[in-house]
Amino acid sequence: MKNFYITSPIYYVNDSPHIGHAYTNLACDVLARYKRLMGYNVKFLTGTDEHGQKIEKAALAKNIDPQKFTDEVSIRFRNLAQIMNISNDDFIRTSEDRHKKAVTAFWEKLKANNHIYLSKYCGWYSVRDEAFFQEAELIDGKAPTGAPVEWIEESSYFFNLSKWQDKLLEFYEQNPEFIYPQSRKNEIINFVKSGLTDLSISRTSFKWGIKVPGDEQHVIYVWLDALTNYISALGYPDLNSEDMKNFWPCDAHVVGKDITRFHAIYWPAFLMAADLPLPKQIIAHGWWTNEGQKISKSLGNVIDPLSLIEQYGLDQTRYFMMKEIMFGSDGNFSAESMVRRINSELANTIGNLAQRTLTMLQKFFEGKIPNIKKEELDKDLVKLLDVTIKNYHQEIDKLNFSGALEIVIELGFAANKFIDDKAPWNLAKTDMEELAKVIYVLLEANRVIAYLLQIFMPDSANKLLDQLLVEKRNFSDINHSLVAGTVLPAPQVIFPRYS
Ligand code: MSP
């Protein structure tokens, strides 16, 4: 069995989860489910990033001990994953012992390989981004993200990042698929070409973090700490652990575009320095705006995924998020578009097709799948089923999730039109043999749609497959047609209209 390791970023626990966190997790989930249905042995990791100045500040502001504070907030991320039907296999917290042990060992390895030295950091720091900036990078005295910066001067350990510039460029050259999408890749390459400076990897002005081994005045820089989660969850430093052997190097680190730099520059440099193989791909997605506006706490327009789910339904929300945004680009949340998609694409197209087909099966054949000759089925629709499956896989391979969904919806449109054209209610009076063929091929269209929607809307797709009494649900089973003579249960509405 082939292995596939996919990770989400680990989320800062300074605040409650919002649509951005939900989206990153959902994108990973869709890919993880796809690979599982393709027969891979998948490990999907998510978790929380709990150290650093930002979290310490948030805990202090609430007058709570940081560990207690992170315990409380981390649970909300874990719950969100569960509520959203995210199929993660593990959930890592950076305050866990397994992680601290791995980070300490990783540091010691970098040190032993002579890539760490002690000096002094003088420069700008953004607590919100947990990132260092050079004077030239500031825009109007702020970080490029708009976050405030503060001047810091402190004793610090450094990682010799500048030494890795050529090796990184060589690696990008040899692995053209390493950074997705292309636009992000160009950004990263330009940044590296413009020259890398050594990276400060420890802080002394606060305490909430993992201590530098042998120098307890220093805590390890939160990004070095956080990135290591991808291997601490596999049992690092034990290179012979089953998980390390099966799942490292990672197949896909899925991240938002804002944190590509940490994953595509720092992380590979750290890994090379620690003699570990590099991940195969960094997949960067775009950002959501809310009704056209940047999402921010100060604007008060943060979208709570839980209220979306409550208002519109879980699978409807999952569908909207994956359909609305062209993966890799930015996208906008609007209530109007959400309702339009739920009603026209889900209720009127997919839902209506299932309802019409299954109701006619009950009405004209008492629920029994008719016996037909396959070669006599409508050739165009049969061909469309094959083409749909083929194109869907192609789009998913390109990480074009919205494109894959569009292909499924188009099949729904075509099948509904087929019903209108054939007018089965008339055939029922004149030609039962033709009617049997029409209903059979429609059942097949529903079956294919249900298979293909599993990764996006697992509950709803499974309900449809249940109604069709389909047992085997892997993609390798998609060519097993429905069996004549089987009696299907009376249909139940799967995609209600939103009103
Ligand atoms: N803790 C770091 C990641 C460390 S990974 C080793 C971090 N955490 S975060 O909580 O700030 O962000 C987590 C993810 O949420 C990122 O992938 C980020 O891009 C995503 N989003 C945050 N706001 C977003 C939107 N408005 N839209 C889409 N995704 C956004 O960064």
Image (tube, rainbow, N blue to C red):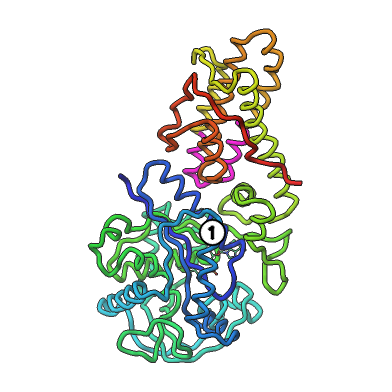
Crowdedness near tag 1: few (<14), some (14–19) or many (≥20) residues, C-alpha within 10 Å? many
Q: Is residue 416 left or right of residue 436?
A: right
Viewer-closest of 460 and 488: 488
Residue 415: x and y, percent?
Answer: 63, 26
Residue 88: x and y, percent?
Answer: 45, 57
Query: Of helix, strand and loop, which mostly describes the magenta segment?
Result: helix
Viewer-closest of 308 and 361: 361
Does the magenta portion include 406?
Answer: yes
Does the magenta portion include 358?
Answer: no
Q: Is residue 18 left or right of residue 255?
A: right
Q: How many marks?
A: 1
Residue at left 55%, top 62%?
A: 80
Q: Amino acid at mark 1?
A: Thr
Residue 283: x and y, percent?
Answer: 48, 56
In which image quadrant can residue 349 be found? top right
Residue at left 41%, top 87%?
A: 156
Residue at left 44%, top 86%?
A: 203
Q: Is residue 111 above or below residue 439?
A: below
* Disc 1 C-beta below 8 A from ligand 1: yes
Residue 101: x and y, percent?
Answer: 32, 76
Ligand 1, by image quadrant, is bottom right
Q: Which residue is mark 1?
A: 24
The magenta segment is 391-411
Q: Residue furthest left?
A: 240
Whether residue 229 is visible:
yes
Residue at left 47%, top 60%?
A: 8
Whether residue 134 is visible:
no
Quarter of the rendering occupied by the N terminus: top left
Q: Is residue 442 above or below residue 272?
A: above
Element class at badge 1: helix
Q: Is residue 232 above or below residue 407?
A: below
